[in-house]
Amino acid sequence: MPEMERCYYSRVRRVRRCAPILTASLEMGGFPEVGALSSLRERVELLQGYVDTVLFRDVAERHQISNLTALRSFVRQLLRNPATLLSVSKVYADFHSRGITVSKGTLLEFLDYLEDAFLIFTVCLADRSERRRQVNPRKLYLSDHGLAQAFSPSTGLNRGHLIENIVACELARDSRDLTYVKTSSGFEVDFLTTDFEGNRRLVQVAADISSPKTCEREIRALIEAGKDFPDAARVLVTETDAPLSVTIPETIRIVPVWRFLLS
C-alpha cells in the first residue's frame, strides 16, 4: 500500500476510535452532574430544571418580567436552534401568527437578559462598522450544547450544528473578539477569532467533509475569506478526513474535532 494511503487509513482508524466519545459528549453536554446520569429522561429533566432556575431567578425576577409565556416560548425557540442565524423579526412574526403577544423590542430585551445570564451568546458579523455589526443577523450559540438536546422535540438534531456550538464555546473562552465572516461572493466562514496577542484565525467547522463537493466548498469559503483577512491563519475543523482526490492548500490546516478541543 502506498505511504500516503497508509497514513490516510491510519487517520481514519483514529477518528473512528474517538467518534463514540464525541457522540456521548454531544448527547450529554458539559455539565458534570448530567454526565453522571444514565437515563436520558433524568438528563433532560435536570437540564430543563437548570434552565427554569435561570429563567425565573436570573431573568424574570431580576428584570421583573410578567410576560412569562413569551419569555419561555422565546427561550425554547433559541435552545432548539444552536449555531444558526438569529432573526428576531422572524421570531416576532412567528409569535404573532401563533397568538403570542409580545413586541419586537421586548424580544430584543429578552435576548440581552439571556446573554447576561450566560444561557446563550451571540456572534456578530465581522465588520469595522459597529452599525453593520448590529443591523446584520447574529449567530446564536448555547452556553452548553446539551441544552439543545434537552429542549429538542426529537432526537434528530443537526450534528454539525452541535459540533459548531462546542467549537464556539471553546473559541469564546480564548478570544478577545469572536465574529463570523460573510464574503462578497456569498461564502460564509463560521468564525474569525482574535486572541489577546492580536493573532487572528479563520475557523470553519464541518462535521463531514468526506464528499469531495463538500470538502471543496468548505476550502473555497476559507480561501475567499482569506482574501479579506490575509493575516489570519485558516483552520478547518471536522470529524472526517478530506478525500484523497481533493488538494488541500498549504495555507489551510485540517484539524479533527477531538484534537481541536484537546489543544
Image: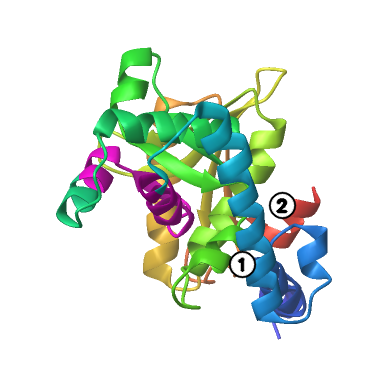
Residue 50's tag is: none
Residue labelled with disc 1: 239
x and y, in percent, of residue 223 in the image: 43, 41
Foreground residue among 55 and 180: 55
Main secondary structure of the magenta stretch: helix
Which contiguous range is marked in magenta? 69-92
Q: Is residue 27 visible?
A: no
- Please report whichever mark, 1 or 2, sits nearer to the chain's N-terminal start: 1
Foreground residue among 252 and 61: 61
User: What residue is drawn where x is 38% and y is 50%?
Assistant: 69
| Magenta span includes 77 | yes
Q: Quadrant of residue 77?
A: bottom left
User: What residue is drawn where x is 51% and y is 65%?
Assistant: 151
Direction bottom: furthest residue: 1
| Magenta span includes 232 | no
x and y, in percent, of residue 52 in the image: 59, 52
Q: Quadrant of residue 6?
A: bottom right
- SS label for mark 2: helix
User: What residue is drawn where x is 65% and y is 79%?
Assistant: 41
Which residue type carries mark 1?
A: Glu
Q: How is the image coloured?
A: rainbow
x and y, in percent, of residue 168 in the image: 59, 44
x and y, in percent, of residue 80 in the image: 45, 60
